[in-house]
């Protein structure tokens, strides 16, 4: 199985997402947290509100989370696997 990498580097996260056609998005929760972060790929999903990278990373930093992602699948194709995890969580 291909390995995943954990990062909090904004440039790496943005580059990874944009290489795969991902756009920053959020699901608003109404609890004052800014919402639950997502990356939207392909056709826009109705449940997701597209936001700018600046707001995305503001929420990301405030939540004190990390981005776990995979560069390639086992067969060498570009992977879209990612998830947001606690910074102290192992990938």
Image (spheres, rainbow, N blue to C red):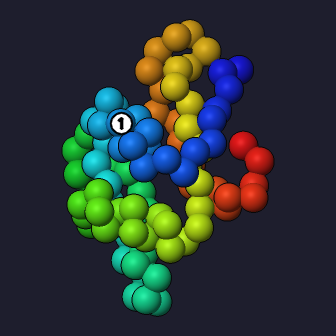
Find residue 46 and report its image quarter: bottom left
Q: Residue at x 53, y 42 (%)?
A: 82
Residue 7: x %, y % from top left: 58, 45
Up-down relation of residue 33 to residue 39 (above or below)? below
Q: Residue shown at 38%/51% (left/top)?
A: 39
User: Residue 70, percent across and down?
Assistant: 56, 31
Dot 1 corresponds to which residue?
Answer: 15
Please name whichever residue, 44 or 50, is drawn nearer the observer in this view of the structure: 50
If the image is split into quadrants, where does the C terminus sit? top right
Q: Give 45 or 91, whichever is nearer the viewer.
A: 91
Q: Which residue occupies the extreme top position in the image?
A: 75
SS under mark 1: helix
Q: Is residue 13 above or below residue 36?
A: above
Q: Does residue 46 appear anywhere in the picture?
A: no
Vertical order, 55 against 39 (above or below): below
Q: Residues within 10 Å of mark 1 (few under 14, many from 20)?
A: few
State whether residue 2 is above or below residue 87.
above
Quadrant (top left/top right/bottom left/bottom right) for the N terminus: top right
Give the number of marks: 1
* Left-right relation of 91 to 26: right
Q: Residue at x 46, y 82 (%)?
A: 33
Q: Residue furthest bottom?
A: 31
Q: Nearer the viewer, residue 91 or 36?
A: 91
Residue 33 seen: yes
Residue for point 59% across, 67% down: 64
Pinpoint residue 59: horizontal percent, then vertical percent.
Answer: 43, 70
Q: Quadrant of residue 12?
A: top left
């Amino acid at each position: 199985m291909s390995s995943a990498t954990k990062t909090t580097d904004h440039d790496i996260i943005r580059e990874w997402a944009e290489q795969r056609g991902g756009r920053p998005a959020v699901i608003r929760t109404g609890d004052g947290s800014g919402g639950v972060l997502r990356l939207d790929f392909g056709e826009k999903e109705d449940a997701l509100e597209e936001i700018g990278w600046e707001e995305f990373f503001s929420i990301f930093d405030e939540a004190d989370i990390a981005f776990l992602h995979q560069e390639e699948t086992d067969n060498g194709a570009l992977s879209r696997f990612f998830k947001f995890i606690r910074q102290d969580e192992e990938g």
